[in-house]
Image: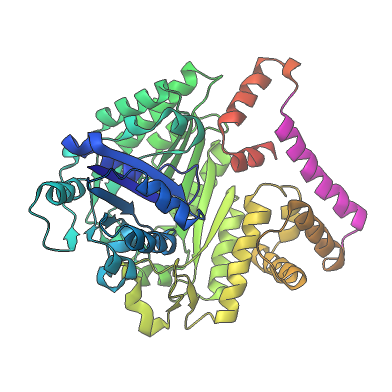
Amino acid sequence: MTILLSTLNARYAHASLGLRYLLANMGDLQEQTRLQEFVIGAKTTDMVEKLLSHQQAGEKLIIGFGVYIWNIEETTKLVAVLKQVAPEVVIVLGGPEVSYETNEQHIVKLADYVITGWGDVTFPDICKQVLQGPKPLMKVHAGVQPPMAQIKLPYDLYSDDDIKNRTLYVEASRGCPFKCEFCLSALDKTAWPFDIDLFLAEMESLHARGARLFKFVDRTFNLNIKTSLKIMQFFLDKLEANPEDPVFAHFEVVPDHLPDALKDGIKKFPPGTLQFELGIQTFNPEVQALISRKQNNDKAAENIRWLCEHSEAHLHVDLIAGLPGETVESFALGFNRLYALKPHEIQFGILKRLRGTPIIRHTQEHGLIFDPHPPYTILANDTISFASMQRLVRFARYWDLVANSGRFAHTLPVILGESPFEHFMALSDWIYARTDATHRIALEKLAALVAEWLSTERGMDKEQVAAMIKSDYAGQSIHQHGPDKSAGKAAVAKTATAASTPSRQARHMAA
C-alpha cells in the first residue's frame, strides 16, 4: 500500500510546507508515504502518469491533494482524469480552498474524502481507516486541531535539493488574533505558537545543512516581542559568525506594533538580509471599521518611515483595492500617503473573495461582484465600476513591472512627480492603449514605452529621457556582474550578501 501527498505549487521554487507537515505526522504510515509535487501549468495526463507510477499491483493507493486558490482549477482536472483511468484510487482533499463552501465544489464530488481545516492528525487517521477498516462513513471530515506540542515539525523533510534550489517556508506560530474580513485568518480564535526553543533547534539544523533563505509564513511575526527577538537573534548570530555566507529572512509584521526593543534588533541587520511584509491594506478609517480591521494609521505610518530611514530592512507594504466603502479617490489618497513614506515596494492587490471569509456579508449593501472563477477577484462594487476596476487591475500589473521590479529606480520618481497615483494611472492607461497587453511585455519594450510616454505625454527632452533610462540599465549591469574581485574584503562581503538576497530586492539595493 502506498500513500502519496501531492499538490500543484505556483512555482518550482515554492516547496510545500503543508505536505511536509502531513508527512512528518504520518506516524507508522510514514514509511509508505511519498511526496509528489508538481507545478501549475504541467500537463494533466503527465501528472496522472507520474502519480499512478507509484501504484503497486494488488495494493491500495491513496492520494492526498493540497488544494489552494491558485491550483483549484488544475487540481480539479487532475482528479477528474485520475478517477476516469483509475477509479479505485482513493482521493483525499485538504487545504483552504476545500475547507469552506465544501459541498458546492465539483472537485469534492469527484473525491472520496475531504478534510476541512487542520490535517496533521485527521489525514493519517483517515488513511488508517481506509487501509485497515472500517472505512469512514462520512465524506467530509472536520480536521482535529491538536495541541501544538503534539505536532511533529517537518523541517528535516526538506531535501538537500530543496535547500539548494527552493525557498524554505517555516512557521513559529499558526493562526492570527485579528479579524480582518478579507482574510481567512479572521476565522482563527487566536495565534498558537510552537515551542520556540524546539523551533530554533530545527532552524539550526536547516542552517547547518546549508539553508540560507528562510521565509516565515506566520501571520503576525511581531505579535509576541520576546519570541520575535529570539528569532531575530538567531539570524543575527549567524550573520555575525559567517558574514561571508549570510542568511536572508522574510517576516510578515503588524505595521503599528514596533516597540523599541524590536527596533534595536532590526537596526543590526546589514543590507540584503532582512525583508518585512507589512499589511496596511487601507488608510481609510471608515473602510477599516467596515472590515473589522484595527489599525493605528499614524503609528503604522511612523513605523514604516522609521524602518525606511533607520534600518536596512527591505519593505513590502500591501494595499488592497476594491474593499467595501473604498472609492478610487480614497484609495488614491492612501496610495499617495504610502508612497510618500518611501517603502521599497508597494504590493498593490485587488480584493479576492476567499472561500469562508466574512467579507461576503457586505455583498448586498456594497454591491460586491466577484469573478465566479478562481482567484475570485472583485469585478465591481457600488463605488467602483467594472471599467474602473479593470483600470486598477492594469495599474497593479504595470506597477509591479515598473516600480516593484527595481528596474526603473532613476526613472520612477520622474514618472510619479508630485501626484504618484494620478501620474502612474495616466501611464498605465497609455501603455494599455498602445499595447492592449499587461503580460509578456519584454523589458526593452517596456523601457521604450516609458521613454516614449515621458517625451510625448510629459514633454520631456528625448535625450534626457534616454540618458535616464540608460542609467537604470547601467545600474542593472553593475548588479549583474558584481564588483571588481580585486576591490577588497568589503566588496567580496557585499557580493556574498547579494548572492543570498532575492533578485528583486538585490535590484533595489543596487539602485
Nearer to me, 423 or 154: 154
> What residue is drawn where x is 23% and y is 60%?
114
Nearer to me, 497 or 170: 170
Q: What is the x, y in percent for residue 141?
A: 17, 59
Q: What is the x, y in percent for residue 450?
A: 78, 59
Q: Residue furthest front?
A: 57
Nearer to me, 73 or 238: 73
Please tell me whether residue 472 belongs to the stretch shown in magenta. Answer: yes
Location of the C terminus by quadrant is top right
Q: Residue furthest left?
A: 134
Location of the N terminus by quadrant is top left
> What residue is drawn where x is 32% and y is 58%?
96
Q: What is the x, y in percent for residue 139?
A: 18, 63
* Magenta-tinted stretch: 460-483
Instruction: Answer with the quarter of the image where residue 356 lies.
Output: bottom left
Above or below — where is 22 with respect to 289?
above
On the picture, is 449 further left or further right than 197?
A: right
On the picture, is 439 further left or further right than 30?
A: right
Looking at the rendered structure, the number of numbered marks drawn on it comes to 0
Above or below — where is 363 with respect to 192?
below
Instruction: Answer with the quarter of the image where residue 365 lies.
Output: bottom left
Dominant SS type (magenta)? helix
On the picture, is 28 further left or further right than 34?
A: left
On the picture, is 65 further left or further right than 263?
A: left
Instruction: Answer with the quarter of the image where residue 447 lies.
Output: bottom right
